[in-house]
Image (cartoon, rainbow, N blue to C red):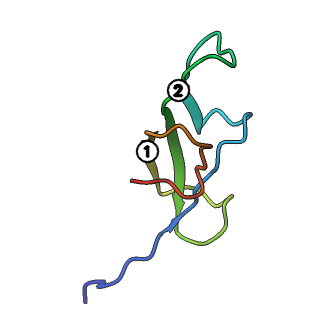
Amino acid sequence: KPCKRMVLYYHGIIFNGTNVANATSAKASNETQLTHKFGMLVVFDDPITKDHHLLSPPVARAQGFYFYDMKTTYNACSPTL
C-alpha cells in the first residue's frame, strides 16, 4: 500500500550575525548617515528533518533568498516571498 502522507519539518534559522548558513549577501560598503539605503538581499540554507528536533539529521535543505525592497527595518521573521 503506497504512503499517501509525508510529513517534514522546516527549521527556519534566522540570521543573527554569526551563522554563515543564513547571511546578508549584498550590502552597501562605507555606509554613512547620508547614504540612501534601499533593499537588502539575504540568502538562506535551512535544514528539513523528519521530526521537530532541530538537531536531527537533515533529509533535505531549503535554500533560497529573501529580497527586501524597502527603506525600513528588515525582519527575516516575516519575509515577503
Coordinates of residue 7 in the picture (x, y in percent):
44, 76
Q: Is residue 41 above or below residue 78?
A: above
Distance (Cα) linking label 2 and label 1: 14 Å
Residue at position x 48%, y 57% in the image: 59
Q: Secondary structure at mark 1?
A: strand
Relative placement, left or right, of 34 versus 43 is right
- Where is residue 24? Give x, y as percent: 57, 31
Give the residue at mark 1.
63
Q: Which residue is mark 2?
A: 25
Q: Residue extending furthest bottom? A: 1
Q: Closer to the camera, 55 or 42?
A: 42
**Residue 70, percent from left and from top:** 48, 40
Q: Give the amino acid type for the residue marked by disc 2 in the picture.
A: Ser
Q: What's the residue at 45%, 51% (across, down)?
A: 62
Question: Badge 1: how crowded within 10 Å, few (<14), some, or many (20+)?
Answer: few
Residue 51 shown left or right of residue 81 in the figure: right
User: Observer-nearest residue: 67 or 13?
Assistant: 67
